[in-house]
Amino acid sequence: MTTDALQNYIDKIAMEAFNKYKIIRDGTSYELAEIEIYVKDLDNGINDIYRHDTDKHLRNAEEYRHYSGFDICHGNKDKKIYCGILVRGLMNDYEAIYGPRRVKYEGRQKHPRDIKIKISEVFENRFTFHSTEINSNVILKLPRVNLSNTTSMDNLYQPEELQKYLNLKGRYLRVKDKNFFSNNGPVESREIWNAILNNATKTI
């Protein structure tokens, strides 16, 4: 699969996730604010080198808890599609929470919060990828962060595969409004501004 085709493939997963899933965290309802996607679909030539190698990713709408936080399992066992959606941020009308560990765990002792994944009963295509305007229905596409250096080194002599997955824009950030940065806002702000600038310059 070409890099462009791969990008389109995971873009569709991202849009489905933002429209489809809600998270109940310790009894409080949230929508997705930031996610990263990891997928393996060998029939379509996708074998993400950074994906956690777990059969749990064959499941659908279930939680896969790990040291970094938790994934929404978004796979398909019959089609042998493995997919994990790392939840990096949550939001509702009252607060936004960023950072996968902060989303899943409480305090330094990393006490796990109760997570339930809810599928929206009515599917609405509410979101668009950022082009010019910033509003609550805009999604930015960004490179994934904190990818394994060990995995990168192991794939150093497969430069095409390494480049494809290392530079994939598999991180998706929902921008609530123009004041989306705060003391507990999304990290790696330079990547965020570069994504906004990249789209802005295309319209000049």
Image: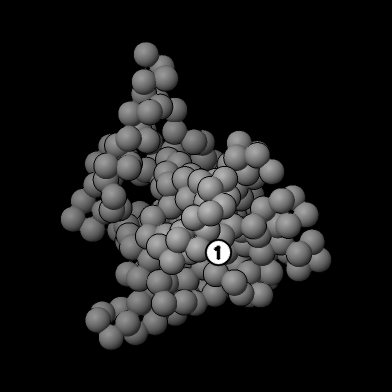
Pinpoint residue 5: horizontal percent, then vertical percent: 65, 39
* Residue at the disc numbered 1: 51
Give residue 75's position: percent from left, percent from top.
Answer: 68, 64
Q: Which residue lies most toward the left here?
A: 183
Answer above or below: position of 91 versus 143.
below
**Residue, x 35% and y 54% (percent of image)?**
93
Res. 118 visible in picture: no
* Residue at 34%, 84% in the rendered image: 111
Q: Type of residue at label 1?
A: Arg
- Left or right for 43, reference 28: right
Instruction: Name the residue nearer the viewer: 85 or 31.
Output: 85
Quadrant in which residue 105 is drawn? bottom left
Residue found at x 44% / y 33%? 130
Q: Position of residue 141 (x, y in %)?
A: 45, 41
The residue sitting at the top extreme is 204
In the figure, residue 63 lies in which quadrant? bottom right
Q: Is residue 100 left or right of residue 165?
A: left
